[in-house]
């Protein structure tokens, strides 16, 4: 008679399954441990990859090379003053081209002798290279107050390759009867138009310039795509986070995603940014590679000089910020419509803290407002195209009665924006005028 068995042996497949499961569990545990260890190290130390050493994170981006080869200062948020005023601008919703010369000042450019290469050069000076095109605008259609200063490109500038800056002739009028208007970028176009506190879910196709700025894979701020390589956001988003290599920008989704996020080549913060006063709260982020535009990714237009926008005009603010004060960020992009508030009314609420670089928008009764996590995001106005008029900056709480949201006034900082874009782009010799320091001293 066979002996009694004290237990059954497991089949081989069960043993293999248990072994594989245990191995996977160990690998997952190791991966999680490695991830949290890396995060802990990154929060405390900067790795000098060339010399294979660590330095305290506080020493990175402090203006002094603490790594042997200086890599701790090679990828840092930089400051930039307004610098030399860009001698080219677009005026009004019609995007009329003006150039600056001494002593004439700002002048419209007559259409005679104008060629496509001049269109390209002017757009490059403004920081754009996408879809440059020009149209002729009849002088009589301009307001009478503007029909006073004109320049013309000399014909021999085309024949002898003479730089245009030395071949602009002042005119009392245009013999062609027309001046040049420019369109330098396919911007401000959305498929549709119609949480932010009091907002509603929306689609990225309606606001394709909306960006998510992410630090170590976590959404911290919003931003606005303004060209194929540049995003505008708030300066305060980068306080204490100066290592550019740890930033990513996500575009093209109405949800916060990390997959496909674009690395950052440069971050420029206005040198006059004052974190205590929230003044000059603006930054520009240069992407490491140009985006491909489409239905879900497209730049917003920067406002032209003398854009007409008045008290009570409807503006739109978008972002993934908290749905209520001190709440969690929204999982879906939110949109709210808010009215522009007159500057005097804004000052009556916040007093002398409001500067010309700020504007207010929202409802005095509260209920609808931007909130934490929306910082740096777009406040836009619809004229012929969507124009970026504000950057989410600060406020007292979120949607509190009597305290509307405060935004960086983009129109007041256009010289700085164009300077930042131009410094990083290949400068166009056609439009770099002589004696630019005198231009900077004269233009306000």
Image (cartoon, rainbow, N blue to C red):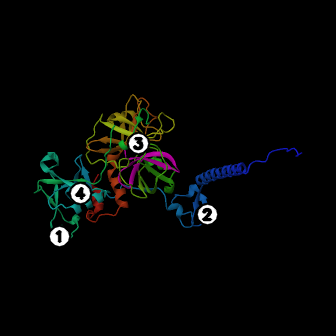
User: How many residues crowd mark 1 within 10 Å: few (<14), some (14–19), many (20+)?
Assistant: few
294 drawn magenta = no
Which residue position is annotated with label 2? 53
Residue sitting at x 70%, y 52%: 16
Q: Badge 4: how crowded within 10 Å, few (<14), some, or many (20+)?
A: many
Q: Is residue 64 visible?
A: no
Q: Which residue is drawn at 33% across and 47% down?
A: 300
- Give the Cα separation between the discs numbered 4 and 2: 52 Å
Compared with residue 339, is residue 10 higher up or lower down, i.e. above or below? below
Q: Is mark 2 on a helix, strand or loop?
A: strand
Residue at x-position 19% and y-position 71%: 160
Mark 4–mark 3 Cα distance, whole angstroms, equals: 32 Å
Q: Position of residue 59 (x, y in %)?
A: 56, 58
Q: Disc 1 designates what residue?
A: 159
Q: Which residue lies furthest to the front in this view?
A: 1
Splitting the image into 4 quarters, where does residue 111 fall? bottom left
Residue 51, horizontal then vertical, whole percent: 59, 67
Q: Which of marks 4 and 2 is nearer the N terminus?
A: 2
Q: How many marks?
A: 4
Instruction: Say which mark, if any, is on residue 392.
Output: 3
Give the magenta-colored segment's residue range: 207-233
Tell me the residue that label 4 is attached to: 100
Q: Can residue 414 be seen in this view?
A: yes
């Amino acid at each position: 008679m066979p002996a009694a068995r004290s237990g059954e042996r497991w089949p081989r497949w069960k043993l293999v399954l248990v072994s594989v499961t245990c191995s996977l569990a160990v690998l997952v545990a190791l991966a999680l441990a490695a991830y949290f260890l890396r995060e802990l190290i990154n929060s405390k130390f900067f790795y000098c990859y060339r010399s294979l050493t660590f330095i305290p994170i506080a020493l990175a981006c402090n203006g002094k090379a603490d790594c042997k080869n200086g890599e701790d200062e090679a990828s840092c948020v930089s400051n930039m003053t307004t610098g030399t005023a860009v001698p080219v601008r677009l005026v009004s919703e019609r995007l009329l081209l003006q150039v600056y010369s001494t002593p004439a000042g700002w002048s419209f450019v007559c259409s005679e002798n104008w060629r496509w290469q001049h269109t390209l050069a002017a757009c490059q000076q403004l920081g754009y290279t996408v879809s440059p095109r020009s149209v002729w605008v009849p002088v009589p259609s301009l307001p009478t107050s503007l029909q006073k200063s004109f320049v013309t490109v000399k014909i021999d500038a085309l024949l002898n390759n003479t730089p245009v800056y030395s071949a602009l002739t002042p005119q009392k009028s245009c013999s062609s009867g027309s001046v040049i208007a420019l369109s330098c970028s396919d911007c401000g176009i959305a498929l549709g138009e119609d949480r932010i506190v009091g907002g509603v879910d929306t689609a990225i196709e309606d606001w394709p310039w909306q960006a998510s700025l992410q630090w170590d894979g976590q959404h911290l701020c919003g931003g606005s795509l303004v060209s194929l390589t540049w995003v505008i956001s708030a300066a305060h988003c980068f306080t204490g986070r100066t290592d550019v290599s740890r930033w990513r920008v996500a575009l093209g989704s109405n949800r916060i995603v990390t997959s496909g996020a674009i690395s950052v080549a440069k971050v420029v913060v206005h040198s006059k940014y004052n974190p205590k006063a929230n003044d000059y709260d603006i930054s520009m982020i240069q992407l490491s590679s140009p985006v491909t535009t489409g239905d879900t990714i497209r730049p917003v237009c920067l406002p032209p000089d003398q854009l007409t926008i008045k008290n009570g005009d409807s503006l739109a603010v978008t972002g993934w910020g908290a749905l209520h004060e001190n709440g969690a960020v929204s999982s879906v992009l939110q949109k709210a419509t808010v009215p522009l508030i007159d500057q005097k009314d804004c000052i009556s609420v916040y007093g002398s803290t409001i500067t010309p670089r700020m504007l207010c928008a929202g409802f005095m009764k509260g209920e609808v407002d931007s909130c934490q996590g929306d910082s740096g995001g777009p406040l836009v106005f619809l004229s012929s195209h969507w124009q970026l008029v504000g950057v989410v900056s600060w406020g007292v709480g979120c949607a509190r009665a009597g305290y509307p949201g405060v935004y960086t006034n983009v129109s007041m900082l256009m010289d700085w924006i164009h300077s930042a874009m131009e410094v990083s782009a290949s400068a166009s010799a056609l439009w770099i005028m002589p004696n630019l320091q005198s231009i900077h001293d004269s233009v306000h």
